[in-house]
Image: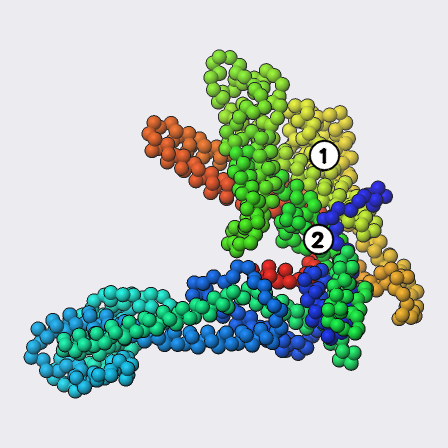
Amino acid sequence: MEVLKNLPEMDLMRSEKMTSVQLIIPVESAHRAVSYLGELGLLQFRDLNDDKSPFQRTFVNQVKRCAEMSRKLRFFKDQINKAGLLSSALPTMQPDIDLEALETQLAEHEHELIEMNANSEKLQQTYNEFLEFKMVLQKAGVFLVSGNKSYETTEGIELDDNVYPSDYPESASLLEQATHSGPSNPSGLRFICGIIPKSKILLFERMLFRATRGNLLFNQAPADDLIMDAVSSEMVEKTVFVVFFSGEQARTKILKICEAFGANCYPVPEDFTKQTQITQEVLSRLSELETTLDVGIRHRNAALHTIGFHLTIWMTMVKREKAVFDTLNMLNFDVTKKCLVGEGWCPIFAKPQIQEALQRATFDSNSQVGIIFHVMDAVESPPTYFRTNAFTNAYQEIVDAYGVAKYQEANPAVYTVITFPFLFAVMFGDWGHGICLLIGALILIAREGKLSSQKLGSFMEMLFGGRYVLLLMSLFSIYCGLIYNEFFSVPYHIFGASAYKCRDKSCSDAYTVGLIKYRDAYPFGVDPSWRGSRSELPFLNSLKMKMSILFGVAQMNLGIMISYLNSIFFNNSLDIRYQFVPQMIFLNSLFGYLSLLIIIKWCTGSQADLYHVMIYMFLSPFDDLGENELFWGQRPLQILLLLSALVAVPWMLFPKPFILRKQHTERFQGRAYGILRSTEMDTDSEPGSARQHVEEFNFSEVFVHQMIHSIEFVLGSVSNTASYLRLWALSLAHSELSTVFYEKVLLLAWGYENILIRLVGLAVFAFATAFILLMMETLSAFLHALRLHWVEFQNKFYGGDGYKFKPFSFAAIADDED
């Protein structure tokens, strides 16, 4: 035990040692001090105003101002994206400006943009009206000419000369004039011209027909140009229509239906000369509007380009300011002493850096009073903080997805770095597929600098974040694939000739039983002669199933050993004596013994039935083993192991709760009153005195918890061992699926002389390999390896009920926004 205590600590094995600290900051240097701490990113503030709403806090007005500036900056960004411009990728350096100056500058820019947008919208709406009017004049003129030929005796017209004065385009809007008509002529034929989106034309025509009971003539023609929708800014295809009707009542109905369908009606004279005159006026006005719109767009883009040049640094500045004021709202404001009081957590190694930053803040703010920084005791458990790098971060995230480690608890990520990709490779073992994964991982690693600065999709972000996990998974897959001797399910004589040959010349192929062993075993991995033989499946089944049990028992023993390291670290001798020892005895008396039998059977070549041995070890422990005996003294050893397993169960269940109750009774017997001590006593004289938070001892609760834990371990030992058989099942499924695609697709297509069939077979094989074997099978093996670590391995020692260390950091704010 002393040897284990003296071992050097690993960086990831235990979380960083944390300390609770208190800050007393003068008001004049508070903002600068919090800003420097945000740049450092090593102090987690505790919210001391938890009972207050956001509107009751000290710096609520500053937070509101920052939120309003953020809204304006988002508006600028949306406008820049809508205009198709690019904001400056790198933040341009400019002289430091304070919050008030930036607020004024943003308000001016917003007012200018809103005014330009309003003018642009009005001009665009007018332009759309004239463009629609032009198309209506062009298309409707054809219908009106044909109408004149058919109805020469008709006296009623829609509009007369008085409707179109010389100043028509400037004096009134076109939509207003659409409602004006000439002198009513109830007995004559009248018409209405307009334009409507093409998607509504069929329903529009049907509604008109029903409203007028078929007493109309409806003509339509597609518009030549697309019209920009004012709401969605999308180009809409429209249709010009002319409705001929009779009577004022029908006219009223038609106009209401046009309004309901969003159709724009325009006044078109029946006289061809006036149509030509108005068309020329409309074309002239369109030309003027196009010029005006181009000038306005150029002016607006110039303003947006100026804003975009500084947008990145403005957004960064506002986000930082808002984060600083949000953090200041977590501090207590002492009005009498004009200072802010804050509390939080920081790693012990970061104390000198934090003190240096606070001293710098005092000097830069010209404060006459320094910032007080001192360590204090805390009752609650500290947060958990592991210093990771690009390689270990992904494995730590895999563990944290299950639950964050308690403070100073053993970290499973140390072992997950190796065990996770290895168990994945046991299920995915094929060195051809492993090479494909390796190429993908190397591409991601080679482009690490470029991809880290880009915004990736969810799938690519997941792949890029796990690039080093993918790297080790591919390397272990190549290793296991060499052991299985599978390259896209094809075996190769890589390490020499086979140990088997045909019994006689009649043994022409591998599908006979005429293979005999004539030399030493194949030097590395599975002998390629097993592939295709009648014994292939029974042999691989036996090999992979027993190998899965060995890996499972080894990893579960590792988990129990880590619980022993936890008990040593926390000086918990009860857990060592009444949990670790009986758990090791129980697990290894049954499944450790099974692993021993597997190894002995492999070494001796015995034909003993291990199923029979393990079943009758429980049912008939005193019976003779007969041909299933693998070594001398096996039966007495089995009886001893069975008794040990039976003793281990009550050993786990009963002693610990009763000992805890006895310790609690002895600790507080005759101590109804505590010893009075001075509140100014140095707490260092009594280590951990501030942490002596005595909870009420409930024996029944402790006993039930221990009983649940014991039953869970006993039943879990059986179910967890069986769960490791997924290594065998998925490995076999991957191998057989690869064989099916190789033999039934590639080889079958290659048997034809037709080059087209061969190319199709090759394409199907490549597609199946890429999407089924490399994507779906990889995901399946990944999830099963994840389950084995979360459930079967970590439940032996890992509590996972801690909380992460989340320091106030500007870098973390930028990552969250991205």
Q: Determine which of the numbered discs, if any, sits on residue 546 in the image.
A: none
Please provide percent x and percent y for residue 184: 16, 86
Please provide percent x and percent y for residue 429: 56, 35
Q: Secondary structure at mark 2?
A: loop
Please provide percent x and percent y for residue 762: 40, 34
Q: Nearer the viewer, residue 520 or 702?
A: 520
Residue depth check, mark 2 versus mark 1: number of the one nearer the observer:
2
Q: Which residue is mark 1?
A: 593
Q: Nearer the viewer, residue 26 or 640?
A: 26
Q: Amino acid at mark 2?
A: Phe
Is the N terminus in the top left, top right, bottom left or bottom right quadrant?
A: top right
Q: Secondary structure at mark 1?
A: helix
Identified at 50% across, 33% down, the residue is 488
Q: Residues within 10 Å of mark 1 (few under 14, many from 20)?
A: some
Please provide percent x and percent y for residue 254: 23, 78
Q: Nearer the viewer, residue 40 or 749?
A: 40
Q: Amino acid at mark 1?
A: Tyr
Identified at 70% across, 65% down, the residue is 36
Please tell me how many numbered marks the rendered image carries.
Answer: 2
Q: Residues within 10 Å of mark 2 (few under 14, many from 20)?
A: some
Is the C terminus in the top left, top right, bottom left or bottom right quadrant?
A: bottom right
Identified at 75% across, 43% down, the residue is 561
Q: Is residue 555 above or below residue 514?
A: below
What colour-coding does the image apply?
A: rainbow
Among the two numbered marks 2 and 1 on one chain, the one whose residue lies closer to the N terminus:
2
| Horizontal side of residue 707 vs 94, given as left or right | right
Q: Which residue is mark 2?
A: 386
